[in-house]
Amino acid sequence: MSPLSQILLLAVGSYFLRVSFIALASRVTEISPRIETALSMIPPAVLAAIAFESLLFDDDSLRGLNEWYIALAIASVVAYRTKSAAWCVGIGMPALWITSLLI
Amino acid sequence: MAGPFGLVYGATATDSGIETFPAILASILVFAGASQIALVELIDDGASWAIAIATGLVINLRLALYSASLAPSFRDFPRRWRFPLATLVVDQTAVLSILEFEEEDDPEYRRWFFLGGGLWMITPWIAGSVIGVLFAGDIPSNWQIGFAVPLMFTALLIPTVQNFPKLAAAIVGGGVTVSTTWLPSGSNIMLGVACGIVAGTLLAERAARSAEKAPT
């Protein structure tokens, strides 16, 4: 199958995932407190899973200790203090470049 | 931040031998970076189309979880808004909207907020992808643009960790994911997420029960 067809199938499948519960929502009127609590846990669990994996692994091998960890620690402190994703990213990339120069 | 992330995807797609048109079309139609990177790398590795697409969809299963989180707010939107807006459900728009919707409950404000956030994300994402695809070989390696991936997900993660159960959901979710990388590609993320959700939910329910018992 051509790369274009694979991309189109992934696009259609991804739209179904995106619209799934939104399309069903008009029929669901009550959400139990337990489901609501579980839903609120989705963002931290998913984001940490992807962040941890992309930090620790370079393709399939473990990433050695390098400037990525220092720069990410600096960016995390900024995110925690400012509560802002934009600041975290704005500081993170320059922090990496400066740390790379120093190490 | 979607710009540098798009750059990473675009450069990976070109390095994987994907032609310009399908590589850019993916950013417009799929609009989910981690799954796009996995798909083009698997195509390059010569994986079967079924495995390549299935892996992309497993990575994107979290979009269904976001769909569930957003559904109660989207229920108040007209249909002509609900279905097109669903195309813009990604990590950033979902997480930021869920936080914003806790403060603002006017449906009209909410749908415009979501549309604005979505366009704010998809525009630099597509622009970054185009630049990455066209100039893959010219990006200096000492820019280390690959760092954009953990940086962006950390930037989104930290504001969502507002209490101990959510911190536990993050640590269990991330910990299980990185300790089960021997599982088939992508499924370790789903396992980690499932464990994180269960851990966070149980701790939150326990905290709620002990708060009820505590003398006032």
Image: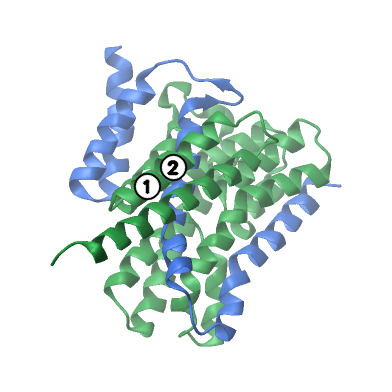
Chain colours: A blue, B green
Q: Residue at x 56, y 35 (%)?
A: B135
From the viewer's side, name the closer residue of A101 and B83: B83
Q: Residues within 10 Å of mark 2 (few under 14, many from 20)?
A: many
- Spot occupied by residue B187 in the image (x, y as percentages of width and height): 65, 42
Q: Secondary structure at mark 2?
A: helix
Quarter holding residue B55: top right
Q: Residue at x 76, y 37 (%)?
A: B43
- What's the chain of the residue with tag 1? B
Q: Residue furthest bottom?
A: B78
B63 up-or-down from B2: above or below? below
Q: Residue furthest left?
A: B216
Residue B149 in sight: no
- Spot occupied by residue B138 in the image (x, y as percentages of width and height): 53, 28
Q: Residue at x 34, y 45 (%)?
A: B167
Amino acid of disc 2: Ala
Amino acid of disc 1: Leu
Residue B66 in sight: yes
From the viewer's side, name the closer residue of A81 and B45: A81
- Spot occupied by residue B158 in the image (x, y as percentages of width and height): 32, 46
B107 up-or-down from B207: above or below? below
Q: Residues within 10 Å of mark 1 (few under 14, many from 20)?
A: many
Q: Are marks 2 and 1 in contact (CB under 8 Å)?
A: yes
Q: Residue furthest right?
A: A1
B139 up-or-down from B65: above or below? above
In screen coordinates, is B149 left or right of B210? right
In screen coordinates, is B51 left or right of B88? right
Residue B157 is tagged as 1
Q: Are marks 2 and 1 on the same chain?
A: no
Q: Secondary structure at mark 1?
A: helix
Q: Which residue is mark 2?
A: A48
